[in-house]
Amino acid sequence: TLTSLIEAEIGRLEEEFSARARTRILRHAQSVRRSLDALATTLLRTEKPLAYEDLMGALTDAGVDGTLRDEMVELFEDYGILCTRETPAERPLAAPETLYSPGSRHLWDYFMAIRLIDEDHVPAPIVSSHPDMAEMYAILLVEKDGTVPQECPDLAQAVGERRAHMLS
């Protein structure tokens, strides 16, 4: 199943994070999984790129130790899970601001879809700004409880009857 593939990828990222951190991380800490979940929740709520402080706040909420948060960000950047963009400073000699946004990775679509399934609500603005997430949501509906996307009123309303039918 799709979930099995995602689970395997997260497992590989957990191992990579543990190796990079060069410190003992409990095998079952699930730092990568908790970080992706917390960041997906934050990104769904804000719908805009995150400043460094907001990114660190989400990782703190995920329980990632202060000394390991930057290592997690580097892992996500290296794997294309997070994209960064520097915006020029408004004042001369001030440091540019770095903004973080989801990379072009299916992991975001998966975690955002899971978050929406858990909330049992599909907000139309979020679905329209994340079309790949809508497809992931549809797949997970079928995988989770056999619900065909066109039979999910929230999804059909968010993406339209025609698109819901195409997702089925």
Image: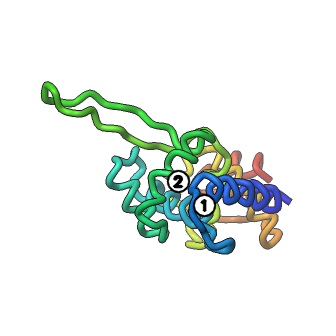
x and y percentages locating residue 26 in the rendered image? 63, 73
Q: Residue at x 38, y 40 (%)?
A: 99
- Cβ atoms at labels 2 and 1 below 8 Å apart: yes
x and y percentages locating residue 64 in the rendered image? 48, 66
The residue identified by callout 1 is 32
Residue 16 circle label:
none
Query: Is 76 on the left or on the right of 68, as rendered?
Result: right
Q: Residue at x 73, y 57 (%)?
A: 138
- Tell me the SS state at disc 2: helix
- Tell me the SS state at disc 1: helix
Q: Residue at x 65, y 51 (%)?
A: 107
Q: Residue at x 58, y 57 (%)?
A: 22
* Disc 1 packing (10 Å; few <14; some 14–19; many ≥20): many
The amino acid type found where label 2 is placed reads: Met
Q: Quadrant of residue 19?
A: bottom right
Residue 72 circle label:
2
Quick check: can you spot residue 120? yes
Colouring scheme, one of rainbow, by chain, secondary structure, one colour: rainbow
> Between 157 and 51, which is closer to the camera in this rendering?
51
The amino acid type found where label 1 is placed reads: Val
> Between 84 and 130, which is closer to the camera in this rendering?
84
Q: Residue furthest left?
A: 91
Query: Is 20 on the left or on the right of 145, as rendered?
Result: left
Query: Is 69 on the left or on the right of 98, as rendered?
Result: right
x and y percentages locating residue 167 in the rendered image? 76, 49
Quick check: can you spot residue 115? no
> Between 162 and 22, which is closer to the camera in this rendering?
22
Report the quarter where the N terminus lies: bottom right
x and y percentages locating residue 109 in the rendered image? 63, 51
